[in-house]
Image: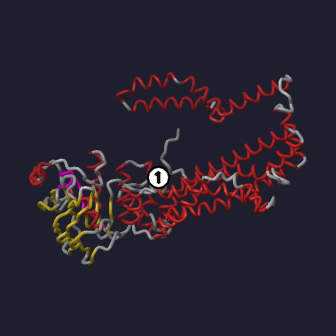
Amino acid sequence: MSEGIEVIIKTAKAVREAHDYSGTAPKVASNKVKKTAPIRLKSLLSDWGTGAIIPLAVLTVWQLAGSAGLISPQFLPAPLSILSAFAALTASGELTHHLGVSIGRAGTGFVIGGIFGLLFGVLTGLFRKAEYLLDPSIQVLRLVPHLAIAPLIILWFGFGEVSKVAIILSGSFFPLYINTFMGIRGVDNKLFEVARVLGFSPLQKLRRLILPAALPSMLLGLRLSMAVAWIGLVVAELIGSQSGVGFLINEAKQNSNTEVIFVGIIIFAVVGKLIDSLFRIIERKLLHWRDSYQG
Amino acid sequence: MGEVMLSITQLNKSFDTAGGQVKALHEVDLEVQEGEFITVIGPSGCGKSTLLRIVAGLDTGYSGSVTLEGANIAGPGIDKGFIFQEHRLFPWLTVEKNIASDLPLNRPDIRQKVDELIELVKLNGFEKSYPRELSGGMAQRVAIARALLRNPKILLLDEPFGALDAFTRAHMQTVLLDIWRRNKTTMIFVTHDIDEAVFLGNRVVILEPRPGKIRKIVPVDLPYPRKKTTNSFQEMRLRVLNYFEKVDELELTDGAGI
């Protein structure tokens, strides 16, 4: 019912907008009216529903093929058997335990790497001298795939928690560093003139101008850092660990327990997406003042 | 009026460009009385923006002397309010927070002054709006309120209404005169619109380009509020236009930094 009303409102709005350009109004308006049918379909499914079409179709075909015995369960277990493996792991409390350990590691690495990234980014962004001193070295390190140094980190710190956190933080440092630096350097010079005319102190310039203006970039860096931390986590846990979702996958691989591998992969995907969504909500809350193309 | 607010003597300013030195201002002398409304007019490249930026303390490296209430201008500051051609509001702050900017809005005296200024620039109801939600004229009024909150000794306006449509521009001129009448702030207003210059100013300073120097200062002894349709206004306009047209027939100059 409400969706129907929405369609009416949308159409009315489209017509009204079209009429604003009086010259081309009749032509544009008729185009908009013709589009009513697809709009209704779209709003019925809603934006979320549109995104679910492909996964649902894949799942259905997959399950049907599995039930019909077309695919070996060793090779590709059907969705429902993955679901039951998931239920069993949840019921035993194993999954919660491993997920908790994984999130703890990723979080620790992300926070430490992020803090350093932010700190260095602010420093090099604000001061040309710091940029000349630090940025070339950081750029060289950035281009080394952080997973390539994982064996070295393990050699240095062993198989304990330290090396896992080190692998994660070595990855999550860079996105936040670069985006903070770029964000600060991207602040409109005209606003700096305003800050001069209004007599801002250096600290006020940082707090009232540079940080708010660089915030969109910094939040993007935060999200990218989070994603890299999540990837680093998998690698860290696949290389010799006794707990965590990565360990769960590795162990399942050794026992040829394909369902559990899928459970682990899905957990990584879902939790990663949830965390990313959380960041996006924060982003939207903090950046509601932006006047940019919304798609 | 009476006291000298701003004194400019033998001001020279050159810019280094790829093609060598370009003289932007040549031996400019100007005295502005307290409470006076000066309009500066001239074709592109006559150095009118440069003149204003020097008074604001934004541009340095000139010869000659520029003093505000007898003191040399050391740099930009809140005693010299500056309105740019674009509003240059902070996009992440609401109207009232933009006006306050670095001053705490929760301090009762600031709160009260901000409210008064919102009233003065007629933006009631838009206190909590963001710059993206404002029209060009509204945003420029916020910028004016932001400058006025700091009680500037002088307000410098660099073609502030240049980007506005004719109707909004006329409205803004009235609003600005209203503010001037109430606050008695000394104003220097740069424009390339002759009507605007004659409508607003006590005196119209006509600059000529290459090098930028004062051709003529025309006192406009018409009472406020002025009406653009009256004969006396049109006569005054023609007088200014006469001087203005002598400025090498409005040649198009390149390298004009508006």
In the depicted view, which residue is nearer to us: A233 or A200? Answer: A233
**Where's residue A110, x and y in %?**
68, 57
Q: Is residue A166 left or right of residue A94?
A: left
Q: Amino acid at mark 1?
A: Ser
> From what the image shows, is residue A119 above or below residue A149?
below
Residue denoted by label 1: B129
Residue B218 in view, yes or no: no
Seen in the picture, residue A157 relative to A61 is either above or below; the reply is: below
Report the side of A225 relative to B78 (left or right).
right
Magenta range:
B188-199
Q: Nearer the viewer, residue A68 or A129?
A: A129
Give me the residue at 44% from left, 31% from top.
A16
Q: Residue at x 57, y 23 (%)?
A: A37
Residue at left offset 65%, top offset 55%: A172
Image colouring: secondary structure
For the question of whether residue B77 can be seen, the reply is yes
Q: Output the chain of dot 1.
A: B
Q: Is residue B190 magenta?
A: yes
Disc 1: CA contacts within 10 A as few (<14), some (14-19) or many (>=20): some
The N terminus of chain A is located in which quarter?
top right
Taking the spot 40% from the left edge, 58% from the top edge, the residue there is: A189
Q: How many marks can you see?
A: 1
The image position of residue A109, as x and y in percent, is: 71, 58
Residue B103 percent coordinates (x, y): 46, 68
Q: Is A177 inside the magenta-drawn segment? A: no
